Amino acid sequence: MSRICSNNMKEIIEENVVESTDTQVKSKKRVADHGEVFTNEREVNAMLDLVKQETERIDSRFLEPACGNGNFLVEILRRKLEVVKARYKKVQLEYERYAVIAISSIYGIDLLDDNVTECRERLFQIFEDQYKKLYKTNIKDDCLSSIEFILSKNIVLGNALTLNKPDSKEPIVFAEWSAVNGSMIKRRDYTMSNLLKAEASKGDNANDLFSTTYEKDPAFLPRSVADYPLTHFLKLSEHV
């Protein structure tokens, strides 16, 4: 009996555990169930270098529809924050404002809750590490709270094929964050399905999903499902 239990346990372990040196796979079961295989850092950088100019534009929006634990989004944020640091580190408030803009431009969807949590944590840690290194003890809790809040809205649990949350008909909703009058932020929420419909209606003139093309042509404005008052970028976590 003990031998059978031991063999069964061995099968379970082998099914779920992958060598720690293999950073592309968390477990064989996740590969079988979800087709989950992460992209290596070398390939991530090679692909992002194809759009290098956009990855270094602070407000350029990126959406990863199967973000996993964030390999692509982490590198995009690193690049954006290096630009923010180079341009604005001498004035802390300016650095904070543009860091918020950079982070608010990054979006991700994943089917697995643990991936969503890990992705948010990795992105937050990248910002926090640079922020504390630059300003040491002069750290604002409000700034950290705004960053956490943005990530909670931008990195979401969902199925990019159905445009809904897993095992639910509840739609995926994203927040758009627009800088207004310097330190103020305008937030509007949109369902992903509505954004895609607006994008598809452009036909051959379509641009990236999260581009600002529709702002230039009101015929393509998607409908928001929630609209929030202008808020200072350090007070975003006060949104309900």
Image: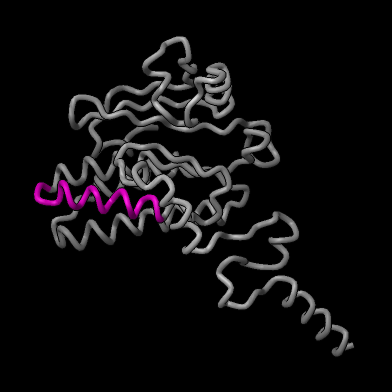
Residue drawn at x 32%, y 35% as measured from the top left: 238
Which part of the image, by quadrant, shows the N terminus? bottom right
What is the quadrant of residue 188 in the picture?
top left
> In the displayed structure, does residue 29 sit left or right of residue 214?
right
- Residue 153 screen position, x and y as percent: 44, 39
Which residue corresponds to the image point at 18% horizontal and 55% vertical from the top-left? 139
Considering depth in this image, is 185 or 53 the residue closer to the camera? 53
Image coordinates for residue 110, horizontal then vertical, percent: 58, 47
| Residue found at the far top of this picture | 219
- The residue nearer to you, when weighing 43 against 21, is 43
Residue 141, above or below 18: above
Within the image, what quadrant is residue 11 found in?
bottom right
- Does the segment drawn in magenta span residue 222? no
Q: Is residue 19 left or right of residue 205?
A: right
Placement of 9 over or under 134, stated as above or below: below
Quarter of the picture containing the C terminus is top left
Q: Is residue 191 left or right of residue 97?
A: right
- Which residue is pictured at 42% across the width and 11% down the height? 218
Q: Outermost residue toward the right? A: 1
Q: Residue 219: percent from the left, percent from the top?
A: 46, 10
Which residue corresponds to the image point at 16% horizontal and 47% vertical from the top-left?
87
* 13 over 27 or under it: above or below: below
Characterize the magenta stretch by its predominant secondary structure: helix
Highlighted magenta segment, given as a residue range: 75-91
User: Is residue 78 in the magenta section?
Assistant: yes
**In this rendering, would 23 be left or right of 88?**
right
Give coordinates of residue 166: x percent, y percent: 66, 42
